[in-house]
Amino acid sequence: MPSFRFFLPIQVRYGDVDAQRHVNNAVYFTFMEQARAAYLQHLGLWDGRDFDAIGIILAETRCTFLAPIRLETPVRVGVRTVRLGTKSMEIAYSIENASTGQVLATGQSVQVAYDYLKAMSIPIPDAWRQTITAFEGPDPASASSQELSREM
Amino acid sequence: MPSFRFFLPIQVRYGDVDAQRHVNNAVYFTFMEQARAAYLQHLGLWDGRDFDAIGIILAETRCTFLAPIRLETPVRVGVRTVRLGTKSMEIAYSIENASTGQVLATGQSVQVAYDYLKAMSIPIPDAWRQTITAFEGPDPASASSQELSREM
Amino acid sequence: MPSFRFFLPIQVRYGDVDAQRHVNNAVYFTFMEQARAAYLQHLGLWDGRDFDAIGIILAETRCTFLAPIRLETPVRVGVRTVRLGTKSMEIAYSIENASTGQVLATGQSVQVAYDYLKAMSIPIPDAWRQTITAFEGPDPASASSQELSREM
Amino acid sequence: MPSFRFFLPIQVRYGDVDAQRHVNNAVYFTFMEQARAAYLQHLGLWDGRDFDAIGIILAETRCTFLAPIRLETPVRVGVRTVRLGTKSMEIAYSIENASTGQVLATGQSVQVAYDYLKAMSIPIPDAWRQTITAFEGPDPASASSQELSREM
């Protein structure tokens, strides 16, 4: 179970709520995207302005829904890099009630390092690897391997 | 020019930004809706939970765009009731840079008092009228009349 | 009352429906934007691909809501240029039930001719003026003047 | 590799496109939701109107992104039930270029049978099981088991 060193509070919007009167499933991915962008900015890996310089492209994403989010729910999203490969990295998310800590949903995404101007995937830059490792602790990759091995 | 006694900070989302790389026009109406719902809650006119008890339905809305909103722009929305009619009320919005006070957009909306369970419009309840007048000052209706007369 | 020569069918989405169980107000502006982009493509004024070449920027937009749109409502949006000024143009919209012709909402938008690469407003190009006039009929501008004079 | 007997054409919207100038990742889940709702209606399992009678709640969803979707891309989404359990069912999606058949993204979702009025999960009704099996062919469950076994 990863512990999260970065959390982003999310402002749930009236317009996020669908006909079932809880937050629509697609909006969870908007929450994770928002938290991911904030995490990259927090780590100094993106300036929040230059969309051609964001450095990663999404390859896969998933979410497991545990409890509904309502308009009044105070939400925060935990973000943590759980795997750093050669060309891809995996991020885990915990969408939580910010007051109670209850986990409302969990998510994962796989990103590929990407040069938007050249429109091609690239190796993860060493600077990213060092920054992320410094933030997340000694060895996110091997931590992730342990998790994966527990899954088998 | 109305002065606003209620402001809601808005968290601009990565997903609010469109291909022009500023916040999409439709999202401004989501911002105004969000601020309107928060204003109703701030005044104790809605509990933020019971969607059948929100008490108003939108009849008309408009927005004038003055400057683009970017992902990094700190946004707040001012909300003020500027007219209280028999069955309808008008709300004005100021979408602003929360740091500089620059007005990025202005908006208006007309709401009709509405009973969602009966699916019919109703007169604005006296309790609403008193609460709004108490909050906005002596006479939002006549203030609005003056504004309208200046427009002609 | 303008007659519309261009209509775009709209696919209402499950995610367009909000907690009130009809289409959310902000989504009407997405419908109008979609119809506006299709109209520009229909007239050969935009290729649908180059977002730096779309040629206009939104200055103002409004919508009047007449009847709710539900998930099953077959929707089409009529688009018509109703005014061609020196630097700006006004477009009118009719959001309709495509089966019955019932008008569900009406809208207007004001656009300013804009060079996105230079980030500055420009006069409406003559080619636009000719194309729009040829499509809409002899004189959209004076038709609009008559409408406005009727409003006073 | 499942073959899909149901496809829904999707109208890509200007507003679906984000700052990267292709369809935003969260919108893929809106596309899948839209296709899922249409699939349930096509099978007669939902009337498209009563949101308390939709019969399932989303437990998990995922998407793998293979190629960007642009505003002009003609999109269709294939939907197929690939597993029918006691209380849950799994649906697979293929988001495709409707002209070329190129697969742009694949997705999966797990739904739990749910009584919205009682706010509790229920066993999948026999009528659903029969309808889905009749539509998808003799044995979606065992087909899925084979797929899963291939994954291990």
Image (cartoon, coloured by chain):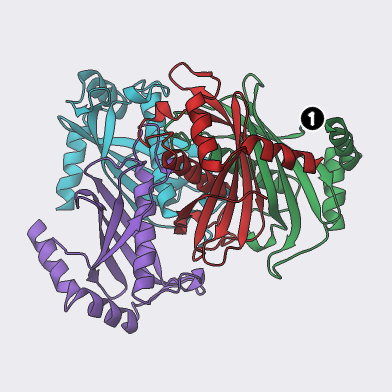
Chain colours: A green, B cyan, C purple, D red
**Residue reaching furthest top?**
D118
Vertical order, A19 against C86 (above or below): above
**Horizontal arrangement in the rendering, residue D22 relative to residue C116 (left or right):** right
Disc 1 chain ID: A
Q: Residues within 10 Å of mark 1 (few under 14, many from 20)?
A: few
Asked whether C125 or B119 is in front, the reply is B119
- Count of marks overlaid on the render: 1
**Horizontal arrangement in the rendering, residue B141 relative to residue B81 (left or right):** left
Identify the residue at image location x=33%, y=24%. Answer: B52
Identify the residue at image location x=21%, y=37%. Answer: B143
Q: Secondary structure at mark 1?
A: loop
**Horizontal arrangement in the rendering, residue D73 relative to residue A84 (left or right):** left
**Residue reaching furthest front?**
D138
Q: Is residue B73 visible?
A: no
Could you tell me residue B79's position as x and y percent?
36, 37
Could you tell me residue D86's position as x and y percent?
61, 24
**Horizontal arrangement in the rendering, residue B28 relative to residue C62 (left or right):** right
Identify the residue at image location x=33%, y=26%. Answer: B54
Q: Amino acid at mark 1?
A: Ser
Q: Quadrant of residue D141?
A: top right
Vertical order, B136 against D136 (above or below): above
Could you tell me residue D43's position as x and y percent?
44, 39
Asked whether D30 or A93 is in front, the reply is D30
Q: Is residue B62 visible?
A: yes
Q: Quadrant of residue D152?
A: top right
Could you tell me residue D63's position as x and y percent?
64, 47
Asked whether A112 or D102 is in front, the reply is D102
Identify the residue at image location x=67%, y=21%. Answer: A101
Per the image, the residue denoted by label 1 is A3
Asked whether A94 or B149 is in front, the reply is A94
Vertical order, A19 against A90 (above or below): above
